[in-house]
Amino acid sequence: MRTADTASVLGQWPDGGERDKLHTMPPVSSGGAAADALRRPAHAINPTSRRQIEIVLSRSVGGIGFIFALQTLPAMASQLDDLKPGWGPFLAITLYSSVALVVVCTVIQVGIRVACTIVSAGYLAALLAWPALLMVPDAVLQDKPWLWYFCSIATSCAALAFPLRWAAVYAITAPVAYGVLRLTPAGGHADLLLAALDAVYAILLGQVVLIIIVMLRQATAAVDIAQSNALRKYAAAVRHHATELERVEVDSIVHDSVLTTLLAAARAETPKEAELAVTMAARAMARLTDAGVPVANDETVIPFARVSQRIRHAAEAFASPFVVVEKNVDMITVPLQASDALYSATVQAMVNSMQHAGTGDITRTLTLRSNSRGGCTIEITDTGVGFDARAVPSERLGLRLSIMERMESAGGAVKLRTAPGEGTTVTIVWPRPAESGPDTGVIGPAHPGADDPATGVDR
């Protein structure tokens, strides 16, 4: 009865004190999947998205279009006298102002498609109206029309503003219209080969720009889809992990408190024992209620010395107290969730020793110390009868639920060493060593000092 009552003290702080003030946990490399899943990035990474690519593409087209427009100024100025009075400046102001509108829209990121559509439509209209705007319609223009320099600007704007099919059609239509214009006197009456070369050059340039834009959009869409899938998988993994943590906690509480309370109540024969069973039941109910409270922030830590103090108080309450050895416990801090798991798992290991190590002259030792990974190692050793761990039925829940799975969920590890007649050593370590894997079942003769635990088997 005293042993069962000691097992029910989980969750109490010695001397009735409050938990330590919370502070930020320094980085700890645990190497454990459970611990890694608990951590959250301090800052969200800004992913490449369709919007960001559109900003880059639009500003690139606007900037390059503005440069091309500036290069057109000398040719435009030299041909103003060939156009009808008023129409030359009107055409120039219309096209240059539309390019300037694109630049402004790409800077403020508003109305980009509308501005690009204006440039593309305005350029086609200018090509069609060009012969009618000449001072002498039948006169042969001495040089190619200055509209040539706007062709790449117009096709690039069409690639931004139009759907893929219509952008590809425009990238062919506009250069072909210019090539036809070049064959006429108003376009300089160029021979067929020269006009064809100009048109093909403009088509190739427009198609290259269109291909680059389409490829960047598709790549960015693929990145966004992959990111969305990854976020969904991560959210599902987090939900699964939270459910698993809750299951382990509830299973541990059921084994540590509820089943122990039921056994104590069934064996109660005196009023004092019945009163003790009632007290244990109240504590078990309180623990089940506390299990529904959200866990603390993952970055919260407490000094391990405080956890060591709680464990030491629990060890002193047993009928056969443990010899407690502490080494460098003041140098360690552990996460709050891990501290609860360390305390509960250690007390359950001590309860197992009291219940299963046998009677007689048995030495029980509890060692708490720091380890080389910046965490802690706890060893519960007895010189009792030991047992064949592989012969323990799978339905026995002591080590598997209350100790092993509890520490796994907190990013730690447990190792069991025992053999018939050679005592038992349970080693609890936090954080989990990177080289240890789950359920490795390392079992051997009991001996203290192991600092590389893997998870063990049930006891």
Image (cartoon, helix red, strand yellow):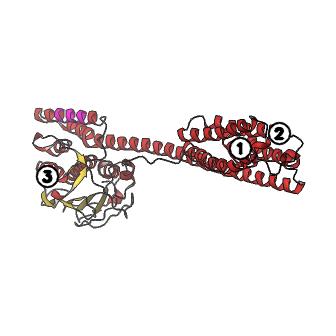
Q: Nearer the viewer, mark 1 or mark 3?
A: 1
Quarter of the image for residue 225 reads top right
* Figure check: 443 above or below 280: below
- Nearest the camera: 363 or 359? 363
Residue 282: in magenta span? yes
Secondary structure, mark 3, is: helix
**x and y, in percent, of residue 183 in the image:** 88, 49
- Nearest the camera: 302 or 369? 302
- Nearest the camera: 406 or 164? 164
* Figure check: 230 above or below 269: below
Q: Residues within 10 Å of mark 2 (few under 14, many from 20)?
A: some
Residue 96: in magenta span? no
Q: Quadrant of the C terminus?
A: bottom left
Which region is colored magenta? Answer: 278-287
**Residue 345 seen in the figure:** no
Q: CA distance from mark 3 to mark 2?
A: 105 Å
Quarter of the image for residue 17 reads top left
Residue flagged by tag 3: what amino acid is it? Arg
The residue that disc 3 covers is: 312
Secondary structure, mark 1, is: helix
Residue for point 23% across, 38% down: 261
> Which mark identifies residue 154?
1
